[in-house]
Amino acid sequence: MVPLHRRSGRRRVLAATVGMAMAAAITVLPGAASAVAADGTAAAEGPLLSYVVNTKVDHGTIKSVERAIGKAGGQVVISYEKIGVIVVHSANPGFAAAIREAHGVETAGATRTSAIAPASTTELGAPEKLTAAQVAAATAKAGAGQEPLEPNQWDLRAIKADQAAMVNPGSSKVTVGVIDTGIDDTHPDLAANFSASQSANCVGGVADTTPGAWRPYNPATDYHGTHVAGEIAAARNGIGVAGVAPGVKVAAIKVSEPVTSLFYPESVVCAFVFAADHGISVTNNSYYIDPWLYNCLDDPDQRAIVDAVNRASKYSERKGVLNVASAGNSNNDLDSHALTDASSPDDSTAVTRTVDPHQCFDIPTQLPGVVTVSATGVQNLKSYYSSYGRGVIDVAAPGGDKYQIPDTPGKNGRILSTLPGNTYGYLQGTSMASPHVAGVAALIKSKHPNATPEQIQWILKAEADNPGCPTGLYDPDGNGVQDATCTGPQRVNSFYGFGIVDALDAVTK
Protein backbone atom coordinates (compact mmCIF):
# COMPACT_ATOMS: atom_id res chain seq x y z
CA MET A 1 0.00 0.00 0.00
CA VAL A 2 0.97 3.65 -0.33
CA PRO A 3 -0.34 6.50 1.81
CA LEU A 4 -3.21 8.62 0.53
CA HIS A 5 -1.74 11.32 -1.68
CA ARG A 6 -1.99 14.97 -0.70
CA ARG A 7 -5.08 16.69 -2.10
CA SER A 8 -4.84 19.85 -4.17
CA GLY A 9 -5.27 23.23 -2.50
CA ARG A 10 -8.84 23.32 -3.78
CA ARG A 11 -9.85 20.21 -1.82
CA ARG A 12 -8.03 21.40 1.32
CA VAL A 13 -9.94 24.69 1.18
CA LEU A 14 -13.19 22.83 0.70
CA ALA A 15 -12.54 20.43 3.56
CA ALA A 16 -11.66 23.27 5.94
CA THR A 17 -14.69 25.28 4.90
CA VAL A 18 -17.51 22.78 5.06
CA GLY A 19 -16.21 19.63 6.81
CA MET A 20 -18.10 18.43 9.93
CA ALA A 21 -19.87 15.43 11.50
CA MET A 22 -22.88 13.76 9.74
CA ALA A 23 -25.98 11.40 10.10
CA ALA A 24 -29.55 10.02 9.86
CA ALA A 25 -32.98 11.33 8.93
CA ILE A 26 -35.77 11.59 11.48
CA THR A 27 -38.35 14.32 10.81
CA VAL A 28 -40.70 14.28 7.81
CA LEU A 29 -43.37 16.89 7.17
CA PRO A 30 -44.81 16.69 3.64
CA GLY A 31 -46.19 19.63 1.70
CA ALA A 32 -45.26 23.29 1.33
CA ALA A 33 -46.29 26.41 3.16
CA SER A 34 -47.67 29.69 1.88
CA ALA A 35 -45.19 32.54 1.96
CA VAL A 36 -45.36 34.63 5.11
CA ALA A 37 -43.18 37.38 6.45
CA ALA A 38 -41.36 37.14 9.78
CA ASP A 39 -44.16 39.09 11.49
CA GLY A 40 -46.76 36.58 10.26
CA THR A 41 -48.26 38.78 7.56
CA ALA A 42 -48.66 37.58 3.98
CA ALA A 43 -45.59 38.01 1.78
CA ALA A 44 -45.21 38.06 -1.99
CA GLU A 45 -45.17 34.57 -3.43
CA GLY A 46 -42.67 33.32 -5.96
CA PRO A 47 -42.06 29.87 -7.46
CA LEU A 48 -42.08 27.02 -4.98
CA LEU A 49 -38.40 26.18 -4.50
CA SER A 50 -36.44 23.71 -2.42
CA TYR A 51 -33.78 24.85 0.06
CA VAL A 52 -31.13 23.30 2.28
CA VAL A 53 -30.68 24.84 5.71
CA ASN A 54 -27.50 23.70 7.47
CA THR A 55 -27.32 24.06 11.24
CA LYS A 56 -25.30 23.24 14.28
CA VAL A 57 -25.68 19.59 15.15
CA ASP A 58 -27.80 19.44 18.28
CA HIS A 59 -31.48 18.67 18.79
CA GLY A 60 -32.36 21.96 20.49
CA THR A 61 -30.79 24.11 17.82
CA ILE A 62 -32.44 22.15 15.02
CA LYS A 63 -35.89 22.47 16.62
CA SER A 64 -35.32 26.20 17.09
CA VAL A 65 -34.32 26.53 13.41
CA GLU A 66 -37.39 24.54 12.35
CA ARG A 67 -39.59 27.07 14.14
CA ALA A 68 -37.73 29.89 12.43
CA ILE A 69 -38.28 28.16 9.09
CA GLY A 70 -42.04 28.29 9.62
CA LYS A 71 -41.92 31.97 10.55
CA ALA A 72 -39.93 32.70 7.39
CA GLY A 73 -42.52 31.10 5.13
CA GLY A 74 -40.99 27.66 4.75
CA GLN A 75 -42.06 24.14 5.59
CA VAL A 76 -39.74 21.35 6.65
CA VAL A 77 -39.72 18.41 4.24
CA ILE A 78 -37.18 16.38 6.22
CA SER A 79 -34.55 16.97 8.89
CA TYR A 80 -31.33 14.98 8.86
CA GLU A 81 -30.59 15.77 12.49
CA LYS A 82 -27.14 14.28 13.04
CA ILE A 83 -25.70 16.08 10.02
CA GLY A 84 -27.65 19.25 10.65
CA VAL A 85 -29.24 19.42 7.19
CA ILE A 86 -32.88 20.45 6.83
CA VAL A 87 -34.66 20.27 3.47
CA VAL A 88 -37.29 22.98 3.13
CA HIS A 89 -39.91 24.07 0.60
CA SER A 90 -40.86 27.73 0.35
CA ALA A 91 -42.56 30.09 -2.08
CA ASN A 92 -41.24 33.14 -0.23
CA PRO A 93 -38.62 34.89 -2.42
CA GLY A 94 -36.98 36.24 0.74
CA PHE A 95 -36.82 32.92 2.56
CA ALA A 96 -33.08 32.28 2.21
CA ALA A 97 -32.08 35.76 3.35
CA ALA A 98 -34.42 35.55 6.33
CA ILE A 99 -33.40 32.09 7.52
CA ARG A 100 -29.68 32.87 7.30
CA GLU A 101 -30.25 35.33 10.16
CA ALA A 102 -31.77 32.67 12.43
CA HIS A 103 -29.75 31.53 15.43
CA GLY A 104 -27.95 28.25 14.77
CA VAL A 105 -28.05 28.47 10.96
CA GLU A 106 -24.58 28.11 9.44
CA THR A 107 -25.43 28.14 5.72
CA ALA A 108 -28.69 28.14 3.79
CA GLY A 109 -29.68 28.46 0.15
CA ALA A 110 -31.94 27.48 -2.70
CA THR A 111 -31.09 24.22 -4.42
CA ARG A 112 -32.61 25.33 -7.73
CA THR A 113 -33.34 28.52 -9.66
CA SER A 114 -36.66 27.55 -11.23
CA ALA A 115 -39.61 25.43 -10.21
CA ILE A 116 -39.82 24.09 -13.78
CA ALA A 117 -36.59 22.83 -15.31
CA PRO A 118 -35.55 21.74 -18.82
CA ALA A 119 -34.24 18.27 -19.57
CA SER A 120 -30.63 17.42 -18.76
CA THR A 121 -28.37 14.45 -19.46
CA THR A 122 -25.21 13.19 -17.79
CA GLU A 123 -23.56 11.30 -20.64
CA LEU A 124 -22.38 12.01 -24.19
CA GLY A 125 -25.37 11.27 -26.40
CA ALA A 126 -28.07 8.61 -26.48
CA PRO A 127 -27.04 4.95 -26.35
CA GLU A 128 -26.21 3.10 -29.52
CA LYS A 129 -28.46 0.07 -28.99
CA LEU A 130 -27.80 -3.42 -30.22
CA THR A 131 -30.65 -5.00 -32.16
CA ALA A 132 -32.23 -8.25 -31.06
CA ALA A 133 -30.68 -9.90 -34.10
CA GLN A 134 -27.19 -8.72 -33.09
CA VAL A 135 -27.62 -10.08 -29.58
CA ALA A 136 -28.93 -13.41 -30.91
CA ALA A 137 -26.03 -13.74 -33.36
CA ALA A 138 -23.49 -13.04 -30.62
CA THR A 139 -25.16 -15.56 -28.33
CA ALA A 140 -24.95 -18.24 -31.01
CA LYS A 141 -21.21 -17.64 -31.45
CA ALA A 142 -20.35 -17.43 -27.75
CA GLY A 143 -17.48 -19.60 -26.65
CA ALA A 144 -17.40 -21.68 -23.47
CA GLY A 145 -16.94 -19.64 -20.32
CA GLN A 146 -17.53 -16.29 -22.03
CA GLU A 147 -20.60 -14.09 -21.97
CA PRO A 148 -22.17 -13.75 -25.45
CA LEU A 149 -21.40 -10.03 -25.83
CA GLU A 150 -18.10 -10.10 -23.95
CA PRO A 151 -15.94 -10.08 -27.11
CA ASN A 152 -17.08 -6.45 -27.52
CA GLN A 153 -16.15 -5.58 -23.93
CA TRP A 154 -12.60 -4.40 -24.52
CA ASP A 155 -12.89 -2.47 -21.27
CA LEU A 156 -12.94 -5.64 -19.14
CA ARG A 157 -9.73 -6.86 -20.74
CA ALA A 158 -8.14 -3.40 -20.38
CA ILE A 159 -8.30 -3.65 -16.58
CA LYS A 160 -7.99 -7.46 -16.44
CA ALA A 161 -11.51 -7.86 -15.05
CA ASP A 162 -12.03 -10.97 -17.17
CA GLN A 163 -9.03 -12.59 -15.49
CA ALA A 164 -10.07 -11.36 -12.06
CA ALA A 165 -13.48 -13.03 -12.40
CA MET A 166 -11.80 -16.43 -12.66
CA VAL A 167 -9.98 -15.81 -9.37
CA ASN A 168 -12.65 -13.99 -7.34
CA PRO A 169 -15.78 -12.47 -8.90
CA GLY A 170 -16.59 -10.57 -5.72
CA SER A 171 -18.67 -11.27 -2.65
CA SER A 172 -22.46 -11.13 -2.45
CA LYS A 173 -21.95 -9.50 0.95
CA VAL A 174 -20.64 -6.38 -0.79
CA THR A 175 -23.15 -3.95 -2.32
CA VAL A 176 -22.47 -1.05 -4.67
CA GLY A 177 -25.10 1.66 -4.50
CA VAL A 178 -25.76 3.24 -7.90
CA ILE A 179 -26.84 6.83 -7.21
CA ASP A 180 -28.37 7.63 -10.57
CA THR A 181 -31.56 7.52 -12.68
CA GLY A 182 -32.73 4.21 -11.25
CA ILE A 183 -32.13 0.61 -12.31
CA ASP A 184 -34.28 -1.82 -14.26
CA ASP A 185 -33.83 -4.68 -11.82
CA THR A 186 -35.87 -7.01 -14.05
CA HIS A 187 -33.05 -7.13 -16.60
CA PRO A 188 -31.86 -10.77 -16.76
CA ASP A 189 -28.22 -9.69 -16.45
CA LEU A 190 -28.97 -7.73 -13.25
CA ALA A 191 -31.83 -9.50 -11.48
CA ALA A 192 -29.67 -12.08 -9.66
CA ASN A 193 -27.33 -9.43 -8.25
CA PHE A 194 -29.90 -6.77 -7.38
CA SER A 195 -30.50 -5.84 -3.73
CA ALA A 196 -34.03 -4.51 -3.30
CA SER A 197 -33.63 -4.14 0.48
CA GLN A 198 -30.86 -1.58 -0.11
CA SER A 199 -32.66 0.38 -2.84
CA ALA A 200 -34.82 3.50 -2.73
CA ASN A 201 -36.16 6.52 -4.58
CA CYS A 202 -34.56 9.60 -2.97
CA VAL A 203 -36.01 12.20 -5.37
CA GLY A 204 -37.03 15.26 -3.39
CA GLY A 205 -34.91 14.38 -0.37
CA VAL A 206 -37.03 11.69 1.32
CA ALA A 207 -36.28 7.99 0.79
CA ASP A 208 -39.16 5.96 -0.68
CA THR A 209 -38.55 2.22 -0.35
CA THR A 210 -41.81 1.11 -1.94
CA PRO A 211 -41.04 -1.92 -4.14
CA GLY A 212 -40.11 -0.73 -7.62
CA ALA A 213 -39.81 2.95 -6.62
CA TRP A 214 -36.12 2.72 -7.57
CA ARG A 215 -36.85 1.92 -11.23
CA PRO A 216 -36.42 4.53 -14.02
CA TYR A 217 -39.34 6.92 -14.49
CA ASN A 218 -39.02 6.58 -18.26
CA PRO A 219 -36.93 3.62 -19.47
CA ALA A 220 -36.56 5.24 -22.90
CA THR A 221 -34.72 8.26 -21.49
CA ASP A 222 -33.60 7.26 -17.99
CA TYR A 223 -31.31 4.43 -19.09
CA HIS A 224 -28.15 5.79 -17.49
CA GLY A 225 -28.36 4.00 -14.13
CA THR A 226 -29.11 0.62 -15.71
CA HIS A 227 -26.04 0.96 -17.97
CA VAL A 228 -23.86 1.86 -14.98
CA ALA A 229 -25.21 -1.08 -12.94
CA GLY A 230 -24.32 -3.55 -15.70
CA GLU A 231 -20.76 -2.25 -15.89
CA ILE A 232 -20.38 -2.91 -12.18
CA ALA A 233 -22.14 -6.22 -11.63
CA ALA A 234 -23.80 -7.80 -14.68
CA ALA A 235 -23.82 -11.50 -13.83
CA ARG A 236 -21.72 -14.13 -15.54
CA ASN A 237 -24.78 -16.20 -16.37
CA GLY A 238 -24.41 -16.98 -20.07
CA ILE A 239 -26.54 -13.96 -20.98
CA GLY A 240 -25.41 -10.69 -22.56
CA VAL A 241 -22.48 -8.91 -20.90
CA ALA A 242 -20.35 -9.26 -17.77
CA GLY A 243 -19.64 -6.71 -15.07
CA VAL A 244 -16.30 -5.84 -13.48
CA ALA A 245 -17.44 -7.50 -10.24
CA PRO A 246 -20.08 -10.05 -11.32
CA GLY A 247 -20.40 -11.58 -7.86
CA VAL A 248 -21.27 -8.44 -5.87
CA LYS A 249 -24.68 -6.85 -5.35
CA VAL A 250 -25.95 -3.59 -6.80
CA ALA A 251 -28.62 -1.34 -5.33
CA ALA A 252 -30.48 1.52 -6.97
CA ILE A 253 -30.74 4.87 -5.23
CA LYS A 254 -32.71 7.01 -7.66
CA VAL A 255 -32.07 10.76 -7.53
CA SER A 256 -33.09 12.04 -10.98
CA GLU A 257 -36.22 14.18 -11.30
CA PRO A 258 -39.08 12.95 -13.49
CA VAL A 259 -39.22 14.58 -16.95
CA THR A 260 -36.11 16.76 -16.47
CA SER A 261 -33.70 14.07 -15.19
CA LEU A 262 -31.97 16.72 -13.04
CA PHE A 263 -30.02 15.63 -9.95
CA TYR A 264 -30.81 18.15 -7.20
CA PRO A 265 -28.78 18.46 -3.95
CA GLU A 266 -31.51 17.38 -1.54
CA SER A 267 -31.92 14.09 -3.45
CA VAL A 268 -28.19 13.38 -3.29
CA VAL A 269 -28.06 14.21 0.43
CA CYS A 270 -30.81 11.62 0.92
CA ALA A 271 -28.87 9.11 -1.21
CA PHE A 272 -25.61 9.35 0.74
CA VAL A 273 -27.41 9.06 4.07
CA PHE A 274 -29.52 6.14 2.82
CA ALA A 275 -26.41 4.31 1.57
CA ALA A 276 -24.68 4.85 4.89
CA ASP A 277 -27.62 3.56 6.90
CA HIS A 278 -28.30 0.49 4.74
CA GLY A 279 -24.96 -1.28 4.70
CA ILE A 280 -23.73 -0.21 1.27
CA SER A 281 -19.95 -0.51 0.82
CA VAL A 282 -19.35 1.62 -2.29
CA THR A 283 -21.41 4.23 -4.12
CA ASN A 284 -21.05 5.19 -7.76
CA ASN A 285 -21.75 8.82 -8.68
CA SER A 286 -21.76 9.38 -12.44
CA TYR A 287 -23.23 12.88 -12.47
CA TYR A 288 -22.77 16.42 -11.26
CA ILE A 289 -25.32 18.02 -8.97
CA ASP A 290 -27.68 20.40 -10.74
CA PRO A 291 -28.28 23.23 -11.37
CA TRP A 292 -24.64 24.41 -11.12
CA LEU A 293 -21.77 22.76 -13.00
CA TYR A 294 -19.47 24.41 -10.46
CA ASN A 295 -20.65 25.54 -7.02
CA CYS A 296 -18.81 28.67 -5.87
CA LEU A 297 -18.25 29.31 -2.18
CA ASP A 298 -18.70 33.08 -2.55
CA ASP A 299 -22.35 32.55 -3.54
CA PRO A 300 -24.54 31.85 -0.47
CA ASP A 301 -26.87 29.45 -2.26
CA GLN A 302 -24.06 27.44 -3.85
CA ARG A 303 -22.06 27.47 -0.61
CA ALA A 304 -25.04 25.93 1.19
CA ILE A 305 -25.30 23.22 -1.48
CA VAL A 306 -21.64 22.28 -1.06
CA ASP A 307 -22.02 22.29 2.72
CA ALA A 308 -25.09 20.03 2.71
CA VAL A 309 -23.76 17.45 0.25
CA ASN A 310 -20.35 17.39 1.93
CA ARG A 311 -21.94 16.69 5.31
CA ALA A 312 -23.86 13.76 3.83
CA SER A 313 -20.81 12.42 1.97
CA LYS A 314 -18.60 12.58 5.05
CA TYR A 315 -21.30 10.85 7.12
CA SER A 316 -21.39 7.99 4.64
CA GLU A 317 -17.60 7.65 4.77
CA ARG A 318 -17.67 7.49 8.55
CA LYS A 319 -20.20 4.69 8.24
CA GLY A 320 -17.82 2.74 5.97
CA VAL A 321 -18.88 3.82 2.46
CA LEU A 322 -16.34 4.59 -0.28
CA ASN A 323 -17.78 7.15 -2.72
CA VAL A 324 -16.55 7.05 -6.33
CA ALA A 325 -17.38 9.80 -8.85
CA SER A 326 -16.80 10.74 -12.47
CA ALA A 327 -14.56 13.72 -13.31
CA GLY A 328 -16.83 15.21 -15.99
CA ASN A 329 -17.01 15.36 -19.76
CA SER A 330 -15.89 18.94 -20.46
CA ASN A 331 -12.18 18.24 -21.14
CA ASN A 332 -11.50 20.83 -18.44
CA ASP A 333 -8.27 21.09 -16.47
CA LEU A 334 -9.74 21.12 -12.98
CA ASP A 335 -6.48 22.45 -11.55
CA SER A 336 -6.27 25.45 -13.88
CA HIS A 337 -6.48 29.14 -12.96
CA ALA A 338 -9.87 29.84 -14.53
CA LEU A 339 -12.69 27.91 -16.19
CA THR A 340 -15.62 29.02 -18.29
CA ASP A 341 -19.05 27.74 -17.30
CA ALA A 342 -21.67 28.44 -19.98
CA SER A 343 -24.23 25.85 -18.84
CA SER A 344 -25.30 27.06 -15.40
CA PRO A 345 -27.89 27.22 -14.06
CA ASP A 346 -29.28 24.38 -16.15
CA ASP A 347 -32.81 24.54 -14.74
CA SER A 348 -33.55 28.07 -16.02
CA THR A 349 -31.50 30.46 -18.16
CA ALA A 350 -27.79 29.71 -18.27
CA VAL A 351 -25.35 32.60 -17.97
CA THR A 352 -21.72 32.41 -19.07
CA ARG A 353 -19.40 32.97 -16.13
CA THR A 354 -15.71 32.57 -15.34
CA VAL A 355 -15.07 30.51 -12.24
CA ASP A 356 -12.03 30.02 -10.03
CA PRO A 357 -11.53 26.25 -9.73
CA HIS A 358 -9.92 26.75 -6.33
CA GLN A 359 -13.15 28.25 -4.98
CA CYS A 360 -15.76 26.66 -7.26
CA PHE A 361 -16.34 22.92 -7.22
CA ASP A 362 -17.88 20.15 -9.30
CA ILE A 363 -19.72 18.11 -6.68
CA PRO A 364 -19.80 15.41 -5.52
CA THR A 365 -16.65 14.53 -7.49
CA GLN A 366 -14.44 17.19 -5.87
CA LEU A 367 -15.55 16.66 -2.29
CA PRO A 368 -12.84 15.53 0.15
CA GLY A 369 -12.59 11.75 0.36
CA VAL A 370 -14.40 11.05 -2.91
CA VAL A 371 -12.44 9.03 -5.51
CA THR A 372 -12.32 11.14 -8.69
CA VAL A 373 -12.11 9.19 -11.96
CA SER A 374 -11.00 10.23 -15.44
CA ALA A 375 -11.80 8.21 -18.58
CA THR A 376 -9.63 6.29 -21.03
CA GLY A 377 -10.10 4.54 -24.37
CA VAL A 378 -8.81 1.24 -25.70
CA GLN A 379 -5.33 2.72 -26.29
CA ASN A 380 -5.01 3.54 -22.57
CA LEU A 381 -5.09 7.21 -23.59
CA LYS A 382 -7.24 9.82 -21.87
CA SER A 383 -10.60 10.01 -23.61
CA TYR A 384 -10.97 13.18 -25.68
CA TYR A 385 -13.83 14.52 -23.53
CA SER A 386 -12.55 13.60 -20.06
CA SER A 387 -11.80 16.36 -17.59
CA TYR A 388 -8.49 16.03 -15.78
CA GLY A 389 -6.21 17.87 -13.37
CA ARG A 390 -3.11 17.30 -11.31
CA GLY A 391 -4.02 16.68 -7.68
CA VAL A 392 -7.67 16.24 -8.70
CA ILE A 393 -7.80 12.92 -10.55
CA ASP A 394 -7.24 9.95 -8.25
CA VAL A 395 -7.38 7.10 -10.78
CA ALA A 396 -8.52 6.43 -14.35
CA ALA A 397 -10.61 3.69 -15.98
CA PRO A 398 -12.18 2.83 -19.34
CA GLY A 399 -14.96 5.26 -20.23
CA GLY A 400 -14.84 4.77 -23.97
CA ASP A 401 -13.71 6.96 -26.84
CA LYS A 402 -15.15 7.02 -30.35
CA TYR A 403 -11.73 7.96 -31.73
CA GLN A 404 -9.95 4.95 -30.18
CA ILE A 405 -11.24 1.96 -32.13
CA PRO A 406 -10.77 -1.52 -30.64
CA ASP A 407 -10.17 -4.75 -32.52
CA THR A 408 -13.51 -6.21 -31.46
CA PRO A 409 -16.38 -7.67 -33.51
CA GLY A 410 -18.34 -4.43 -33.19
CA LYS A 411 -15.32 -2.12 -33.75
CA ASN A 412 -16.91 0.26 -31.22
CA GLY A 413 -14.73 2.25 -28.83
CA ARG A 414 -17.56 3.03 -26.46
CA ILE A 415 -18.64 0.92 -23.45
CA LEU A 416 -21.20 -1.86 -23.94
CA SER A 417 -23.58 -2.58 -21.07
CA THR A 418 -27.16 -3.24 -20.01
CA LEU A 419 -30.14 -1.00 -20.84
CA PRO A 420 -33.75 -1.10 -19.61
CA GLY A 421 -36.11 -3.58 -21.21
CA ASN A 422 -33.66 -6.48 -21.56
CA THR A 423 -31.54 -4.60 -24.09
CA TYR A 424 -27.88 -3.60 -24.47
CA GLY A 425 -26.07 -0.61 -25.88
CA TYR A 426 -22.94 1.53 -26.07
CA LEU A 427 -22.27 4.76 -24.18
CA GLN A 428 -19.14 6.79 -23.54
CA GLY A 429 -18.26 9.26 -20.79
CA THR A 430 -16.57 9.57 -17.44
CA SER A 431 -19.99 8.28 -16.33
CA MET A 432 -18.81 4.93 -17.70
CA ALA A 433 -15.30 5.17 -16.19
CA SER A 434 -16.47 5.67 -12.61
CA PRO A 435 -18.41 2.36 -12.37
CA HIS A 436 -15.31 0.45 -13.48
CA VAL A 437 -13.52 1.90 -10.44
CA ALA A 438 -16.52 1.22 -8.20
CA GLY A 439 -16.43 -2.39 -9.39
CA VAL A 440 -12.72 -2.74 -8.63
CA ALA A 441 -13.29 -1.12 -5.22
CA ALA A 442 -16.01 -3.74 -4.58
CA LEU A 443 -13.51 -6.49 -5.43
CA ILE A 444 -11.04 -5.01 -2.95
CA LYS A 445 -13.76 -4.86 -0.29
CA SER A 446 -14.62 -8.49 -1.08
CA LYS A 447 -11.01 -9.57 -0.52
CA HIS A 448 -10.49 -7.28 2.48
CA PRO A 449 -13.91 -7.09 4.18
CA ASN A 450 -12.62 -5.05 7.12
CA ALA A 451 -10.91 -2.42 4.97
CA THR A 452 -11.97 1.19 5.59
CA PRO A 453 -12.90 3.53 2.72
CA GLU A 454 -9.52 5.23 3.05
CA GLN A 455 -7.67 1.89 2.91
CA ILE A 456 -9.62 0.81 -0.18
CA GLN A 457 -8.65 4.08 -1.83
CA TRP A 458 -4.99 3.50 -0.98
CA ILE A 459 -5.15 0.02 -2.53
CA LEU A 460 -6.85 1.33 -5.69
CA LYS A 461 -4.00 3.78 -6.18
CA ALA A 462 -1.18 1.43 -5.21
CA GLU A 463 -2.34 -1.23 -7.69
CA ALA A 464 -3.13 1.14 -10.57
CA ASP A 465 -1.01 1.06 -13.74
CA ASN A 466 0.03 4.48 -15.02
CA PRO A 467 0.88 4.88 -18.73
CA GLY A 468 2.42 8.28 -18.03
CA CYS A 469 1.81 11.50 -19.92
CA PRO A 470 1.70 11.18 -23.74
CA THR A 471 5.16 11.76 -25.21
CA GLY A 472 3.88 13.36 -28.41
CA LEU A 473 0.96 15.50 -29.47
CA TYR A 474 -2.24 14.70 -27.57
CA ASP A 475 -4.63 14.89 -30.50
CA PRO A 476 -7.30 12.17 -30.27
CA ASP A 477 -9.53 13.70 -32.95
CA GLY A 478 -6.61 13.93 -35.39
CA ASN A 479 -6.99 17.59 -36.36
CA GLY A 480 -3.38 18.46 -35.61
CA VAL A 481 -4.19 20.56 -32.53
CA GLN A 482 -3.11 19.76 -28.96
CA ASP A 483 -6.41 19.07 -27.17
CA ALA A 484 -5.13 18.96 -23.57
CA THR A 485 -1.79 19.10 -21.78
CA CYS A 486 -0.76 16.39 -19.33
CA THR A 487 1.48 17.44 -16.45
CA GLY A 488 3.33 15.49 -13.81
CA PRO A 489 5.53 12.37 -13.64
CA GLN A 490 4.49 8.87 -14.61
CA ARG A 491 3.66 7.88 -11.04
CA VAL A 492 1.03 10.60 -10.53
CA ASN A 493 -0.10 12.96 -13.29
CA SER A 494 -3.00 15.12 -14.39
CA PHE A 495 -4.49 12.70 -16.95
CA TYR A 496 -4.56 9.47 -14.94
CA GLY A 497 -3.87 10.36 -11.32
CA PHE A 498 -2.19 7.27 -9.90
CA GLY A 499 -3.08 5.29 -13.02
CA ILE A 500 -5.65 2.99 -14.61
CA VAL A 501 -7.19 0.59 -12.09
CA ASP A 502 -6.29 -3.11 -12.16
CA ALA A 503 -9.01 -5.62 -11.25
CA LEU A 504 -6.68 -8.62 -11.25
CA ASP A 505 -4.38 -7.03 -8.71
CA ALA A 506 -7.44 -6.24 -6.59
CA VAL A 507 -8.18 -9.94 -6.10
CA THR A 508 -4.63 -11.34 -6.04
CA LYS A 509 -2.57 -8.85 -4.03
Image (cartoon, helix red, strand yellow):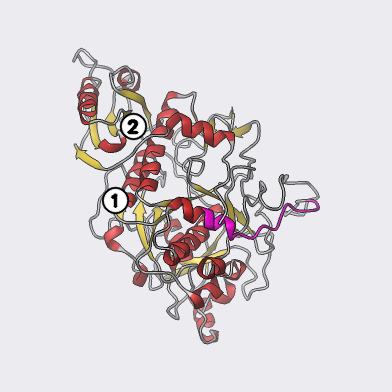
- How many tags in the picture? 2
| Mark linked to residue 166 | none
- The answer to whether residue 112 is seen in the rendering is no
Q: Is residue 321 visible?
A: yes
Q: Position of residue 99 (x, y in %)?
A: 30, 21
Q: Position of residue 447 (x, y in %)?
A: 45, 67
Dot 1, how many residues are within 10 Å of its Cα: few (below 14), some (14-19), or many (20+)?
A: some
Q: Quadrant of the C terminus?
A: bottom right
| Picture quarter with the N terminus | bottom right
Residue located 53% across and 36% down the image: 11
Please check the rendered image and state whether residue 240 is part of the magenta-colored stretch, yes or no.
no
The residue at the point 21 percent across, 31 percent down is 59
Residue segment shown in magenta:
458-473
Q: Please name which of the two marks, 2 or 1, marks the residue nearer to the observer.
A: 1
Tell me the residue that label 2 is attached to.
Answer: 52
Query: How many neighbours does mark 2 have within 10 angstroms: few (below 14), some (14-19), or many (20 or more)?
Result: many
Give the Cα separation between the discs numbered 2 and 1: 21 Å
Q: Chief secondary structure of the magenta span?
A: loop
Left or right, 79 with reference to 168: left
Where 287 sits versus 238, above or below? above
> In the image, is 262 to the left or to the right of 156?
left
Q: Amino acid at mark 1?
A: Asp
Horizontal and vertical percent position of residue 295: 49, 33
Whichever of callouts 2 and 1 sits on the residue coming sooner in the sequence is: 2
Q: Could you tell me the amino acid type at mark 2?
A: Val
- The dot on residue 277 is 1
Work out whether residue 174 or residue 421 is closer to the camera in this orientation and state it. 174
**Residue 123 pos. (x, y %):** 52, 52
Could you tell me which secondary element the residue under label 2 belongs to?
strand
